[in-house]
Image (tube, grey):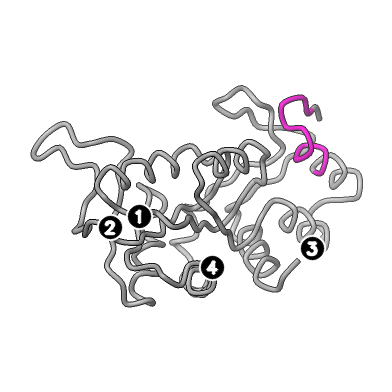
């Protein structure tokens, strides 16, 4: 684990943005039983945490996607982080709705997006990558060149890796599932048996059982 992966994982656990329940799993909309629930929207309510996230995402983007010209926020959870990052990088920002408005000019992208602009999209977390890749498709329709995706956290699901590869869009995150469960163990929030259960979920989430 890198230092930033550990720091952000600890932040998410400390503020309760991530809940681990390997013995009382949650049920996702897809029907999958999951030992983890993530609500990274909580991070905006903690100034020190959101600052570390914004600083981390800005540094990540400068390193991984140095040609970026526009920051895009994925509605709704990615918007506040995109705003903070755009400010740090002194770059224009837009945000992308999940679907076009059904009134007015029917826009899906808010803000000024120059044709051919190299864009990095920001979201709060990556599961299968579906929502952010839909946003990337919308941005491309408007003429943007989506060069990458940055997020706070990834579940590290195989489906996500496959979907990003198929879309030919690279992605980077501040922390991930593996770092988070190892950090939880270090903090004493889970025991060895629970760590094993959590590791098994990442290996095969579809057939995982508590």
The image shows residue 97, relative to residue 55, as above or below, that is above
Q: State how far apart marks 3 and 2 are (Cα).
A: 46 Å
Sequence-first tag of 3 and 2? 2
Q: Quadrant of the N terminus?
A: bottom right
Sequence-first tag of 4 and 1? 4
Q: Are the residues tagged 1 and 2 within 8 Å (C-beta)?
A: yes
- The span picked out in magenta is 199-208
In the figure, residue 2 lies in which quadrant? Answer: bottom right
At 24% from the left and 42% from the top, the residue drawn is 108
Q: State how far apart marks 4 and 1 are (Cα).
A: 15 Å
Q: Are the residues tagged 4 and 3 within 8 Å (C-beta)?
A: no
Judge by depth and name the residue closer to the eye, 113 or 132.
Answer: 113
Left or right: 150 as drawn, with respect to 210: left
Q: State how far apart marks 1 and 3 are (Cα).
A: 41 Å
Judged from this view, the residue extending furthest toward the top is 31
Q: Secondary structure at mark 3?
A: loop
The image shows residue 206, relative to residue 11, as above or below, that is above
- The mark found on residue 116 in the picture is 2
Q: Which one is closest to the eye, mark 1 or mark 3?
A: 1
Q: Quadrant of the C terminus?
A: top right
Q: Which one is closest to the eye, mark 2 or mark 4?
A: 2
> Which residue is label 4 attached to?
64
Image location of residue 151, percent across then percent down: 52, 56
Sequence-first tag of 1 and 3? 1
Q: Which one is closest to the eye, mark 4 or mark 3?
A: 4
Image location of residue 4, percent across then percent down: 65, 71
- Confirm whether residue 50 shows in the render: no
Sequence-first tag of 4 and 3? 4
How many other residues sit within 10 Å of disc 1, few (<14), some (14-19) or many (≥20)? many
Q: State how far apart marks 1 and 2 are (Cα).
A: 5 Å
């Amino acid at each position: 684990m890198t230092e930033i992966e550990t720091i952000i994982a600890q932040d998410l656990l400390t503020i309760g943005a991530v809940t681990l329940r390997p013995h009382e799993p949650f049920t996702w909309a897809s029907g999958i039983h999951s030992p983890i629930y993530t609500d990274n929207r909580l991070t905006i309510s903690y100034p020190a945490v959101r600052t570390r996230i914004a600083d981390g995402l800005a540094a990540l983007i400068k390193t991984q996607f140095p040609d970026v010209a526009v920051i895009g926020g994925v509605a709704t959870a990615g918007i506040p982080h995109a705003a903070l990052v755009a400010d740090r990088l002194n770059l224009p920002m837009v945000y992308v709705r999940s679907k076009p408005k059904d009134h007015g000019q029917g826009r899906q992208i808010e803000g000024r997006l120059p044709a051919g602009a190299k864009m990095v999209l920001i979201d709060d977390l990556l599961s299968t990558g579906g929502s952010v890749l839909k946003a990337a498709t919308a941005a491309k329709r408007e003429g943007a060149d989506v060069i990458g995706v940055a997020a706070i956290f990834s579940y590290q699901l195989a489906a996500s890796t496959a979907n990003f590869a198929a879309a030919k869009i690279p992605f980077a995150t501040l922390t991930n599932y593996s770092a988070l469960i190892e950090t939880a163990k270090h903090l004493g929030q889970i025991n060895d048996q629970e760590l094993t259960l959590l590791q098994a979920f990442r290996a095969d989430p579809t057939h995982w059982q508590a």
